[in-house]
């Protein structure tokens, strides 16, 4: 099983997927690569994907009224 498949198997979404359908759900995911500093999702935008972090790390931040960033958390695989 690839690292991506292992990460997806650990994702909270997959606990609702019966074992006999897991391969079909995995096939629906496309690998996406982001560079350091890229925005993945922005608050207020409609969701168009479900992301599973396979490697690296990401930050969840909120922009304060004065424009500064407030770190809400760090995401790991």
Image (cartoon, rainbow, N blue to C red):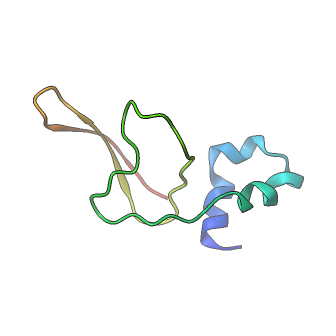
In the displayed structure image, the side of residue 47 where residue 44 appears, left or right: left
Q: Residue furthest right?
A: 20
Residue 64, position in %: x, y?
18, 30
User: What's the residue at 61%, 67% (across, down)?
Assistant: 4
Residue closer to the observer: 23 or 9: 23
User: What's the residue at 67%, 65% (across, down)?
Assistant: 5
User: What's the residue at 36%, 40% (across, down)?
Assistant: 42
Residue closer to the observer: 70 or 39: 39
Q: Residue furthest bottom?
A: 2
In the displayed structure image, the side of residue 31 where residue 45 appears, left or right: left
Q: How many numbered marks does the figure carry?
A: 0
Question: Does residue 41 lie above or below 54 as drawn?
Answer: above
Identify the image quadrant of residue 12. top right
Residue 39, position in %: x, y?
33, 51
User: What's the residue at 54%, 43% (across, down)?
Assistant: 48
Identify the image quadrant of residue 28. bottom right
Residue closer to the observer: 26 or 5: 26
Residue 34, position in %: x, y?
39, 63
Residue 67, position in %: x, y?
13, 34
Q: Residue furthest top?
A: 65
Question: Does residue 72 lie above or below 54 as drawn?
Answer: above
Question: Does residue 42 lie above or below 23 as drawn?
Answer: above
In the displayed structure image, the side of residue 72 where residue 47 appears, left or right: right
In the displayed structure image, the side of residue 50 where residue 18 appears, left or right: right
Q: For the N terminus, which image quadrant? A: bottom right
């Amino acid at each position: 099983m690839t690292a991506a498949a292992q990460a997806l198997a650990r994702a909270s979404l997959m606990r609702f997927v019966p074992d006999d359908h897991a391969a079909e759900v995995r096939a629906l995911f496309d690998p996406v690569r982001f560079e350091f500093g890229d925005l993945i999702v922005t608050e207020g935008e409609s969701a168009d994907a479900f992301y599973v972090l396979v490697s690296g790390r990401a930050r969840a931040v909120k922009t304060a009224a004065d424009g500064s960033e407030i770190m809400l958390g760090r995401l790991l695989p």
